[in-house]
Image (tube, rainbow, N blue to C red):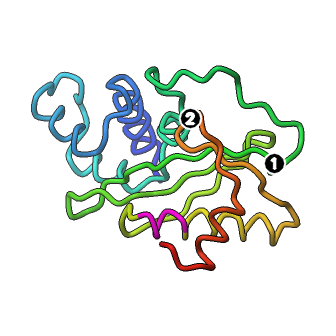
Amino acid sequence: MKAEDEEKLEKIQGIHRKYGHASYNELVRLFYGAPNEFLGITLDDLKMWKKRDFCTGCIVGAMKEHPKYKSTKLLIADVPSKINEADLMFIETNQDGKQPLYVQMDVCTKYVTGVGMNSRKKSECMDAILAVKDDYAIKGCRMEELTFDREPGIVPLEILQRSKELNYT
């Protein structure tokens, strides 16, 4: 990639952060609504930016604690894979739709795992959780607790496995 293209992508990334990690579609609207922000940038540059890897800030931001669900204690873990937190993100697709992405982070190691989903149905969510749990098992770890979207309840994963076995989904 040319240095000039890298500079443009960095400028777009700066605008993306400045406007609260704006999506590609929001940046296109800004491109027309606030053209002074995009001097020297074309729509093709925006398309090139969209094809880059996900913004780490967006992934971590989707997992942040939301104000109306203030946690009474911080999630702290000294043992890898024991305590995990997860959230659903929605990634914009080329067809102007949004596809769910299940994102889970090990509180101790900060290891992030993502699983693409077709919908946000309960069965799809459980399949995504179990896929991550299987990934941990392959690595020799046992995932014990999962806090979803910083909600106060913690779900033991054995309940999810048992409901899967009994076909409750």
Residue 126: x percent and y percent? 54, 65
- The quadrant holding residue 119 is bottom left
Residue 156, relative to residue 150: is it above or below? Answer: below
Residue 115, relative to residue 15: is it above or below? Answer: below
Q: Residue at image x 35%, y 51%?
A: 50
- The quadrant holding residue 131 is bottom right
The one nearer the camera, 53 or 40, is 53
Residue 153, relative to residue 140: is it above or below? Answer: above
Residue 74: x percent and y percent? 70, 24
Would you call the spot at circle 1 few (<14 residues within 10 Å), some (14-19), or many (20 or more)?
A: some
Circle 2 — which element? Answer: loop
Q: Residue at image x 43%, y 49%?
A: 89
- State whether the magenta stretch is mostly helix, strand or loop: helix
Q: CA distance from mark 1 to mark 2?
A: 16 Å
Residue type (three-letter) at the residue carrying disc 2: Arg
Would you call the spot at circle 2 few (<14 residues within 10 Å), some (14-19), or many (20 or more)?
A: many
| Mark 1 touches mark 2? (CB < 8 Å) | no
State which region is magenta.
Answer: 122-126
The one nearer the camera, 4 or 104, is 104
Residue that numbered label 2 is attached to: 150
Residue that numbered label 1 is attached to: 82
Q: Is residue 4 left or right of residue 135?
A: left
Residue 128: x percent and y percent? 55, 66
